[in-house]
Image (cartoon, rainbow, N blue to C red):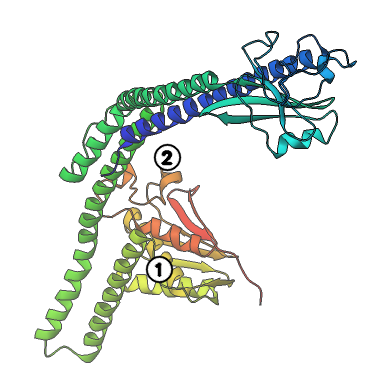
Amino acid sequence: MKLGISGRLALVFGVLVAVVALVVGSISIISAGSEINNDVDRFLKSRADDISSGIRQRPAQRINRRGTRPNPDDGRTNADAPLSGEVSAPNTAVDADAVVQVIDVDGTVATGSGIELPVEDEDLAVLEMPGSSIYRTVEINGESYRMYTTFINGGALQVARNIESTSAVLGSIRTRTIFFAVVLSVLAAVIGWLIARSVTKPLRQLTSSVDSVAATQDLNTTVAFTDRDDEIGRLANGFDDMLGALRTSRKQQHQLVENAAHEMRTPLTSVQANVDFLARANDVDETTRQEMLSRASAQLRELNSVFTEIVELATDSRDPATYEIADLADIAQSACARFEMRATVPVELQSTPCLVHVEPASIERAIGNLLDNAAKYGGNTPITVVVNNGQLSVRDRGPGLGDADLTRVFDRFYRADSTGDKPGSGLGLAIVSKIVTDHGGQAIAENHPDGGARIGFVLPTVTV
């Protein structure tokens, strides 16, 4: 089962608090244990120094095998007495808070106060190095002791202290740390889950809106939280803008289908009428027959070109173009001739030869769109086409363009308010702009000083 955002945040909070609690607790335990051991070590060294300096007496001397003590008049002090024989009762000068033991020069236990302390290689090494000492933790009768072994004249002195209570305290702290880490992690997970549920509530509502749109296809769904100034508000506004764009796109698609059907119905009807006439008219002379077939063929090619451009413009896809160096004046002349085959509007071509690196068919299609646009909005008035130095312009004698139209006339689906009820999809000039841009040129639109609009493009010229 996948966790949602609330579950993941709760898990993250819980793990984070548990890790922090365990790390802090471990550091505290280690620090406390180290401080306690240092305190015990300082106590052991102080006690050993007191005994070595005579402030405290060593444990009572052992009785020799004959049952007599060493002669006190032989000139040796208690500290210099031989360390051999059996252990007698501890000297009362040795306190009960520590265990003291003296090791003879040969490594045997000479005397001690209380339990016998272990003598191992580490302790025997001290006998061979005057001034040396070691600290270590040992286990005696199942209990832990901290032991200090130091060199003294005539052997080595061992002082040990039971640290079992210290270990118990550290163990208790360790157990409590783990317990509180678990409790705090669970508490943090619950708090994190509650916070996450509160924070992600708007996200869940937005998700519900998205699911509703996906299920119902209703693009008029109202989006909440658009009045917020935080990330949720920006997300809600972004979603609302997306719905608005989808509504516009759907409207444009419907408009495109309607306009495309209107635009294609007339030439298709004309082609069908010509074909039907030719099928019935057996006595038509060959010249008239060929002219009608030629017109029908041109109209079908034009319809195919329009259909191809609509698909390419809608999907932003084109077959790889084949570019070549061509005269823009020749391409314009060919486009004008094709236009005159299907229209009754007179066209005046004023051209100066100029070479451009283009795909001729695409540029001819763009010029054809410009001519169609001029014929549509200029009525039956003459159209003037001017070609010079890589620039081509098509001027009509219509009402011209408004200031707002000049900047948007090449937008997809855009139709100026002045177009009224004239048919059109708003794609003709958009196709021109795309073709010209693909050729590295720029589409231009302006009003002519003597009236009407002048729309065209500029292409980079080449020199051979």
Determine whether, in the image, residue 117 is placed left or right of residue 363: right
Is residue 402 visible in the rendered image? The answer is: no
SS at circle 2 = helix
Q: Is residue 78 above or below residue 353?
A: above
- Any mark on residue 136, and which? none
Q: Residue at x 23, y 85 (%)?
A: 288
Closer to us: 197 or 294: 197
Q: Position of residue 206 (x, y in %)?
A: 27, 34
Count of number-bearing discs: 2
Name the quadrant of the C terminus.
Answer: bottom right
Q: Residue at x 77, y 12 (%)?
A: 50
Q: Residue at x 56, y 63 (%)?
A: 459
Q: Is residue 52 above or below residue 206?
A: above
Q: Position of residue 380 (x, y in %)?
A: 32, 59
- Identify which amino acid the numbered label 1 is placed on: Arg
- Identify which amino acid the numbered label 2 is placed on: Ala
Determine whether, in the image, residue 180 is placed left or right of residue 88: left
SS at circle 1 = loop
Q: Position of residue 29 (x, y in %)?
A: 54, 24
Residue, disc 2? 404
Q: Position of residue 409 (x, y in %)?
A: 41, 49
Determine whether, in the image, residue 321 is placed left or right of residue 119: left
Q: Is residue 65 above or below residue 356?
A: above
Task: Indicate which label's residue lies in the foreground, 2 or 1.
Answer: 1
Closer to us: 159 or 214: 159
Return the disc, 2 or 1, that comes first in the chain's sequence: 1
- Any mark on residue 318, and which? 1
Q: Residues within 10 Å of mark 1 (few under 14, many from 20)?
A: few
Closer to us: 393 or 218: 218
